[in-house]
Amino acid sequence: MKIAAFNLSGQGSFAQDAPALADAVKSSGADIVLLPGTSRVRRAVGAAAMRAGAEVDTNVVDLSIDGETVTAQRWLYRQRILATFSRAARPWVVVTDPSLFAGICEKVGAAPAALDPAPAASSRTTVNGLVAAGGGGESTIRPDAKLLFVAGAGWTKKQADGATHLDEAAATITGFLAKSGASLGSSKSLVDMPEAAEAFKFMSHMNQVGQTGATPRHAKGLSTCCHGEEPHVVGWRFIGERRAVNLDANCGWAQGKADVLYVADAFEVMRKVNELL
């Protein structure tokens, strides 16, 4: 059973640390590799373990060796349960609590070696040009606009006549953007919808607001056909005035998340707004 320990101190970048840690794990030939759980190590250890073909566990507070069996301990469920576990895969990268790193190394008889990553190679990427978000035409993302107009999946649903009107929805949205100068946002459900991709070419994942998307800082926000539940509203936390248009009076926007909720058909409302503009 070969055990190695490495220590990273000071400042460094992910581009330096990830390959350096991976090389250290592979070149050491160790079954168990110990690392302190500093922010620098945590940032790079996942990628390093993947490159080295190793398994990795973090937040380990103790390590025990009995012959060829290695067991680790870590707290679970908000420090209510102390779990003891082991892995058969080798190499196994064990990231300990930083304050316990030296004690665990001493317990298992591993002397930490200082790791000094080489400077990251300079980038060879060359920029050939820029393409606006959306379909490659005029950008619909306008950070300096006073209004953020957010479209939800309701624009793709069947309307009162029992049919979908994707082309009309696209024309209504782009018409409003052109006349108002607003920036376009989207719910995740809409940008992930394959049936809307053809009609909504002006929209991409770059327009997504909330969840895994952006958190814009426009003065006002107008949401149309969006459910308005909490994951989506998170993206609105910097917007001062929130308004929404939705046919459902019990939608998420009505639960104290919008300053004004218009219970109406967004197609009719936005058609009239475009006429007025």
Image (spheres, rainbow, N blue to C red):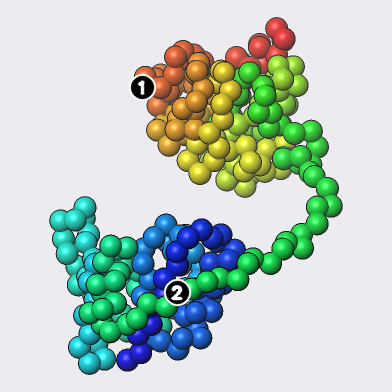
Please tell me whether mark 2 or mark 1 is closer to you in this view: 2
The C terminus: image quadrant:
top right
Q: CA distance from mark 2 to mark 1?
A: 55 Å
Q: Secondary structure at mark 1?
A: loop
Q: Secondary structure at mark 2?
A: strand
Name which of mark 2 and mark 1 comes first in the sequence: 2
For residue 251, what is the image quadrant? Answer: top left
Point out which mark residue 255 bears. Answer: 1
In the foreground, 181 or 272: 181
In the foreground, 91 or 231: 91
Q: Residue at x 19, y 56 (%)?
A: 79
For residue 175, what is the image quadrant? Answer: top right
Q: Is residue 141 above or below residue 206?
A: above
Point out which mark residue 131 bears. Answer: none
Where in the figure is residue 72, as x and y percent of width and height? 24, 74
What amino acid does circle 1 point to? Gln
What amino acid does circle 2 point to? Ala
The 10 Å Cα crowd at callout 1, few under 14, some 14 to 19, many 20 or more, is few
Q: Is residue 168 visible?
A: no
Q: Residue at x 21, y 61 (%)?
A: 75
In the foreground, 195 or 252: 252
Where in the figure is residue 242, as x and y percent of width and height? 49, 18
Q: Is residue 159 above or below residue 264?
A: below
- 153 with respect to 270 (left or right): left
Where in the figure is residue 270, as x and y percent of width and height? 63, 17
The N terminus: image quadrant:
bottom left
- 60 with respect to 152 (left or right): left
Point out which mark residue 114 bears. Answer: 2
Q: Residue at x 74, y 17 (%)?
A: 179
Q: Residue at x 15, y 56 (%)?
A: 80
Q: Is residue 22 visible?
A: yes
